[in-house]
Image: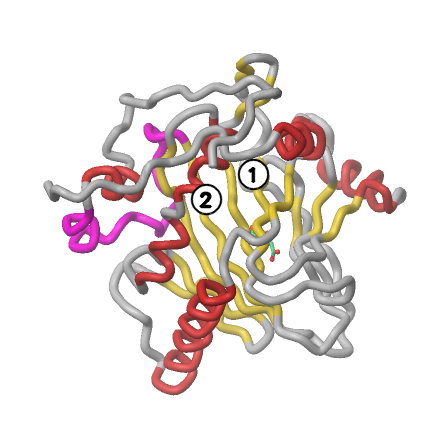
């Protein structure tokens, strides 16, 4: 046990307009979540990990893996202990307040990954719409929709219309898996108004229900797209396979931060509710 405690998590962290946007579309884009310095550190760390791997074949540390090592897609997984800037991102109080908004209560880290995407060249690119979990067992409080799996995806590079920003089928977070996946995608692709692609300055966060159908965007420019993702669930859930916390790192954290990455609170889950009109806590 350590004596320092984690900074307070603001709740609610979303404005009423942001909460309504999330409710309707299944995602909301929040600009300027990270400072220029935070973005620069995360970029340098992620490119540094890629360079070391390409030069030496080495992983950046224990308890992590690389789920993609292609020239056009490099991805490092299970981040909290790999660099302080990764942990700072994944434990950022404002982001935790936002994810608690979706879950409707306290959360644990369930997965974390940083991606570098590069233009594929002449090859035909297609969307790969998917969801990590089907809609199911949601609950509402004060009429607002809560669900068990949420992601914060922050772009570390500026995204214009040709830069392949994350692309979603708006509103599908509540569409049952009984609707055939291919039919859902085909129907959405027939009406561009349903397909939303992130265009935003570096440091902006896409907050979304993981049941929302989403995909990497299509890079038509010549620019890299770099991003970092945190996945969160209620405290009693397990991590995604391969994202178990590094035990030595967890042991050195304060109680709140350790619980965030280990899920130690388990069934000590604390509900958090807001009314749509509640003003955000700064
Ligand atoms: O590349 C992206 O923007 C989306 C990433 C994604 O879909 C995922 O990690 O599940």
Among the 4 quarters of the image, the one containing residue 54: bottom left
Query: First in sequence: mark 2 or mark 1?
Result: 1
Q: Considering the numbered disc 1 on the image, is that residue within a helix, a strand or a loop? A: loop
Residue at the outermost top position: 142
Residue 143 or 210: which is nearer the viewer? 143
Q: Which residue is mark 2?
A: 231
Among the 4 quarters of the image, the one containing residue 176: top right
Position of 167 relative to 123 (above/below): above
- In the image, taking residue 54 as reference, residue 222 lies left or right, namely right
Is residue 243 one of those drawn in magenta?
A: yes
Which stretch is magenta? 234-253
Give the CA separation, mark 2 to mark 1.
8 Å
Q: Circles 2 and 1: CB distance less than 8 Å?
A: yes
Q: Which residue is mark 1?
A: 210
Residue pictured at 79% horizontal, 37% vertical: 183
Report if residue 177 is visible in the image: no
Q: Is mark 1 within 8 Å of ligand 1?
A: no
Q: Considering the numbered disc 2 on the image, is that residue within a helix, a strand or a loop? A: strand
Residue pictured at 30% horizontal, 48% vertical: 244
Position of 276 relative to 182 (above/below): above
């Amino acid at each position: 046990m350590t004596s320092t405690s984690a900074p307070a998590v603001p709740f609610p962290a979303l404005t009423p307009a942001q909460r309504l946007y999330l409710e309707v579309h299944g995602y909301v884009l929040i600009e300027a979540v990270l400072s220029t310095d935070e973005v620069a550190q995360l970029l340098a760390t992620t490119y540094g990990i890629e360079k070391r791997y390409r030069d030496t074949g080495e992983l950046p540390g224990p308890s992590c893996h690389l789920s993609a090592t292609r020239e056009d897609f490099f991805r490092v997984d299970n981040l909290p202990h790999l660099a302080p800037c990764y942990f700072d991102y994944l434990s950022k109080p404002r982001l935790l307040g936002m994810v608690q908004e979706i879950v409707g209560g306290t959360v644990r880290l369930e997965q974390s990954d940083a991606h570098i995407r590069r233009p594929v060249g002449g090859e035909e690119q297609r969307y790969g719409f998917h969801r990590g979990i089907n809609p199911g067992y949601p609950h509402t409080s004060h009429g607002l929709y809560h669900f068990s799996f949420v992601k914060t995806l922050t772009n570390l590079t500026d995204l214009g219309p040709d830069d392949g920003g994350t692309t979603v089928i708006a509103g599908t977070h509540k569409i049952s898996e009984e609707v055939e996946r291919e039919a859902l995608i085909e129907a959405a692709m027939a009406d561009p108004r349903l397909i939303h692609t992130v265009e935003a300055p570096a440091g902006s966060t896409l907050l979304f229900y993981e049941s929302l159908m989403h995909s990497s965007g299509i890079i038509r420019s010549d620019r890299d797209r770099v991003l970092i993702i945190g996945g969160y669930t209620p405290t009693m859930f397990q991590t995604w396979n391969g994202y178990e916390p590094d035990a030595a790192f967890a042991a050195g954290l304060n109680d709140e931060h350790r619980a965030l990455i280990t899920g130690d609170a388990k069934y000590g889950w604390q509900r958090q509710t807001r009314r749509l009109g509640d003003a955000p806590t700064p």
